[in-house]
Image (spheres, rainbow, N blue to C red):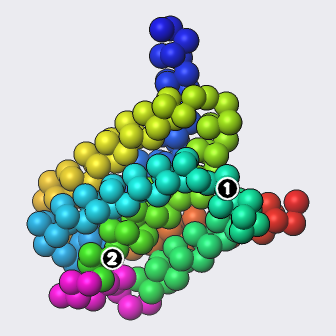
Amino acid sequence: MVELVRELASTFVFLFFAMDAVGNLPIFLALTQEISPKHRRQTANLATLTAFGIGVGFVAIGKAIFSLLGIEVGDFLMAGGIILLILAVKDLVTGRIIETGDSLASETVGVVPLGTPLVVGPAVLAGLLLLIGQHHIAIVLSSLILNLVIQWVLFRQATRIVAFLGRTGVNAISKIVMLLLAAIAVKMIREGIMTILG
């Protein structure tokens, strides 16, 4: 029993840092500032469900897909980085990632980039691939679910955070976040290139 708890704790902590649930919150606020609180909650649900589906699916067939398609971790890093960079640049240049009133865009943002590659992206997928080779699959899945619950709770509280910060505060933070997001994207692309070349 002690060994089980120890393994669960170690896999949970590993995925917690890989997922960066707290770090994803300001990005979520920036991406959903133009939509209503109701749609923001729906986006939080969709992002979490998307992340769950991708995470569980990857645990089940990740290795097989990687082998079949010849995909490397570096490929994931580069693809995720490019997506994030495009979104960050669009926000910094046009002032927003999604158009106000564009219901389709506000719905799909829950899938990309929130569900993936932000919540479950290259770091989490690579971590899952590593963990299932070291621990029982039930332990890894339990740790993934616990981390996703934490992420979901933080996303669902986003409306209260917006009310606390005010519109001006959120706008200011979102611009800073987008600069950081662009930097993160460049870092992911660089790491992907280094992984491929290395």
The C terminus is located in which quarter? Answer: bottom right
Q: Nearer the viewer, residue 159 or 82?
A: 82
- Asked whether, in this view, residue 187 is left or right of residue 196, the answer is left
Looking at the image, which residue is at 62% across and 73% down? 79
Residue 198's place in the image compared with 90, above or below, is above
Report the residue marked by disc 1: 64
**Residue bearing the label numbered 2:** 108
The front one of 79 and 173 is: 79
Mark 2 or 1: the one toward you: 1
Looking at this view, is 30 or 114 the one in front? 114
* Residue 174 visible in the displayed image: no
Question: Which segment is the magenta one?
Answer: 93-104
The amino acid type, in three-letter code, at marker 1 is Ala
Mark 2 and mark 1 lie on one chain; the one further toward the N terminus is: 1
State the separation of the CA atoms marked 2 and 1. 28 Å
Amino acid of disc 2: Thr
Dominant secondary-structure state across the stretch colored magenta: loop
Q: Quadrant of residue 94?
A: bottom left
In this view, the residue farthest toward the top is 2
Picture quadrant where residue 69 is located: bottom right
Residue 6 versus residue 164: which sits nearer the camera?
Answer: 6
Residue 107 covered by magenta stretch: no
Q: What SS does tag 2 mark?
A: helix
Could you tell whether 13 is left or right of 157 in the image?
A: right
Tag 1 secondary structure: helix
Above or below for 150 versus 23: above
